[in-house]
Amino acid sequence: MAWLANNIFTILISLLLIVIVTLIILKLVRDKKKGKSSCGCDCGCCGAKGSCHKKN
């Protein structure tokens, strides 16, 4: 119990960071499913230009 009391702020900050990272990952997955991209959309010099955007 003493260990928990000594590390409560570290535990709370870690949990907060885990929640934030999880929310960011969920947003990226949702955006990917909707066809949105997080890049600048200048695909002319991008190495992954054929894989990130759907061809019309």
Image (cartoon, rainbow, N blue to C red):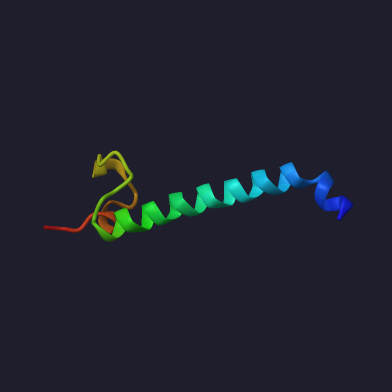
Q: Position of residue 31 (x, y in %)?
A: 30, 53
Of all residues shown, which one is farthest toward the right? 2
The quarter in which the N terminus is drawn is bottom right
Examine the rendered structure and indicate whether residue 39 appears above or below residue 31: above
Q: Picture coordinates of residue 14 (x, y %)?
A: 65, 48
Q: From the viewer's perspective, tell me whether residue 28 is left or right of residue 56.
A: right
Left or right of residue 26: residue 5:
right
Left or right of 4 in this view: 15: left
How many marks the image carries: the answer is 0
Residue 10 position, x and y percent, is: 73, 44
Residue farthest to the left?
Answer: 56
Name the residue at 45% across, 52% down.
23
Q: Residue at x 81, y 52 (%)?
A: 4
Q: List the single residue furthest toward the bottom.
A: 33
Between residues 39 and 19, which one lies in front from this camera angle? 19
Percent from the top left, x then y, of residue 47?
34, 49
Name the quadrant of the C terminus. Answer: bottom left
Describe residue 33's horizontal placement relative to residue 16 as left or right: left
Q: Identify the residue at horizontal 44%, vertical 54% (top origin).
A: 25
Which residue lies at the image location 29% right of the left edge and 38% below the top edge?
40
